[in-house]
Amino acid sequence: MKKLIYFALTAVAFSACNNPSQQKVETTESISSVDTTTSSTTAVDTVHTSQNSLDWAGTYEATIPCADCPGIKTSLQLNNDGTFVLQSEYLERKNKFEEKGNFAWINHGSTIQLQGKENKTQYKVGENKLIQLDTEGKEITGEHADLYTLHKK
């Protein structure tokens, strides 16, 4: 059985290298199909994305960290028509900001990028949450990483 699985995996790898336009490779009963449409080692499901599989429209809130104040109370409303309203209030200050604009789906429909006048912030879209990404589009790590998650209300 091990030899059969090894042979099947070898055949799949060889087929993927020699025929990159092939969508699916069928082998034995134990291995049903392999998607060879992406060049990275991580499989990307282009059928089921956050954009088309989640109920993402709504309002998300969090108090995100601030360098020189207790935090920024943030409310982000995403609308089905691709528009957003972002409200930010710096705690213990009298600074409140509102920005409106459009957002675009990027990264195969898993991430949105705000397209405001001043704002190009990206958020990874999850089930009832948005995870703010850093300026390079990567998840924020470290001790306070969870503070950059906005929850749907």
Image (tube, grey):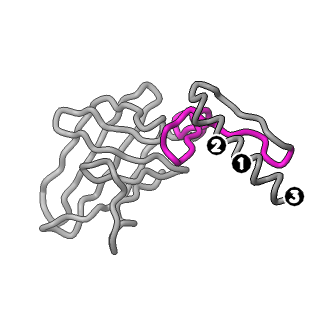
Rounded to the nearest whole Å, what is the CA distance between mark 2 and mark 3?
Answer: 18 Å
- Residue density around tag 1, few if under 14, some if 14–19, many if 20 or more, within 10 Å: some
The residue that label 2 is drawn on is 13
Which element is circle 1 on? helix
The residue that label 1 is drawn on is 9
| Majority secondary structure in the magenta region | loop
Which element is circle 3 on? loop
Q: Earlier in the sequence, mark 3 or mark 1?
A: 3
Quarter of the N terminus within the rendering? bottom right
- Give the quarter of the image for residue 89: bottom left
Q: Position of residue 95 (x, y in %)?
A: 13, 53
Specify start and end residues of the magenta stretch as a single range. Answer: 29-53
The structure residue drawn at horizontal position 71% and vertical position 48%, both measured from the top left corner, is 9
- Give the quarter of the image for residue 24: top right
Rounded to the nearest whole Å, what is the CA distance between mark 3 and mark 1?
Answer: 12 Å
Rounded to the nearest whole Å, what is the CA distance between mark 2 and mark 1?
Answer: 6 Å
Left or right: residue 144 versus residue 55 is left
Q: Earlier in the sequence, mark 2 or mark 3?
A: 3
Report if residue 36 is visible in the image.
yes
Q: Looking at the image, how many numbered discs can be counted on the residues? A: 3
Q: Which mark is residue 1?
A: 3
Name the residue type under label 1.
Leu
Against 6, residue 104 (above or below) is above
Name the residue type under label 2.
Ala
Q: Position of residue 87 (x, y in %)?
A: 27, 46
